[in-house]
Amino acid sequence: MATTLDIVRGISQVLANSHDGALDEEGEPIKIGLKREEGDPIKDSRVMDGFSCRFHGNQICISYQSECRLKDVHANSFESDTEQKIEDIAKFLKKEYKKLTGSTLSLKASGEMKAIVQNVSKVRTWVQAQKYYDIGGTKGTEPVGGDSKDSVDAKFKSFLDLGGFGKKTKNDKRKEPSQGQPVYTEKGVKSRKNVLSDYKNEK
């Protein structure tokens, strides 16, 4: 039975072996299903796209980014095509994970795909999409989400309030700043040229 650490290490190794230009055991280019794999790498202009993954507790987030044309963005199948690319990446991860470790990787889609399209110039347009998947076999791993709770002890919190941004205590008998910079007081802003001169209200 693979542990959570074993699963994370296996996925990380798959990602390390799937860089642009990676080759398999037979010396053939690894096919993931990306646009950059289409056409001849020398004769044809390559489309810049790629993917990355990050772990969130018991989930993995697959991010896909690609160069696209503006007319393709307005096509009805643009969203479904982008989501299909992420699905192809998930299939590739499961296939390579089994080949590498001998175990099966379970990835179940969690939620919908989120995508953003933005213009780099009047000619170039980019799409950035991501989708979360639940990783099977990661028992005991807490999901990431929700607001964090303030667990600071009350005494330590009161100690932090005594810092530079806290309130001045009653036994603090330090003098006012003596450098020639504006000093903010309750009655307005005062400043002086040097240590020997008096404070004057700034206009």
Image (spheres, helix red, strand yellow):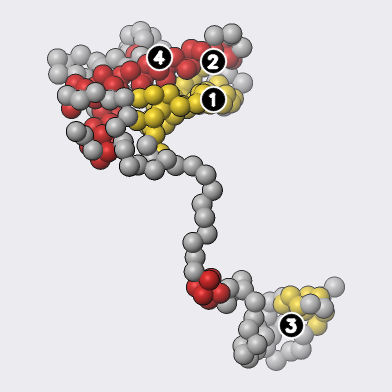
Mark 3–mark 4 distance (CA, rounded to whole Å): 66 Å
Label pair 4/2, CB-CB below 8 angstroms: no
Depth check: give the residue in front, 93 or 181. Answer: 93
Q: Earlier along the polypeptide chain: callout 4 or callout 2? A: 4
- State the CA–CA distance, disc 2 to disc 3: 63 Å
Q: Secondary structure at mark 1?
A: strand
Sequence-first disc among 3 and 1: 1
Check the image and name the residue furthest to the right.
203
Label 4 Cα neighbours within 10 Å, binned few <14 / some 14-19 / many ≥20: some
Give the residue at x 33% y 18%: 91
Tell me the CA gap for discs 4 and 2.
15 Å
Q: Earlier in the sequence, mark 2 or mark 3?
A: 2
Where does residue 191 sit, x and y in percent of width and height?
75, 79
Q: Residue at x 26, y 28 (%)?
A: 14
Residue under label 4? 35
Relative to 171, is 82 above or below?
Answer: above
Residue beneath disc 1: 115
Q: CA distance from mark 1 to mark 4?
A: 17 Å
Residue 62 shows in this picture: no
Q: Is residue 120 left or right of residue 5?
A: right
Disc on the earlier residue, 2 or 1: 2
For marks 3 and 1, give the one nearer the viewer.
Answer: 1
169 is higher (above) or lower (below) than 82: below
| Residue 100 falls in image quadrant | top left
Q: Amino acid at mark 2?
A: Glu
Q: Mark 2 touching mark 1, by CB under 8 A?
A: yes
Residue that badge 3 annotates:
192
What is the crowding at mark 3: few (fewer than 14 residues within 10 Å), some, or many (at least 20)?
some
* Other-residue count near label 1 (Cα within 10 Å), few / some / many at <14 / 14–19 / ≥20: some
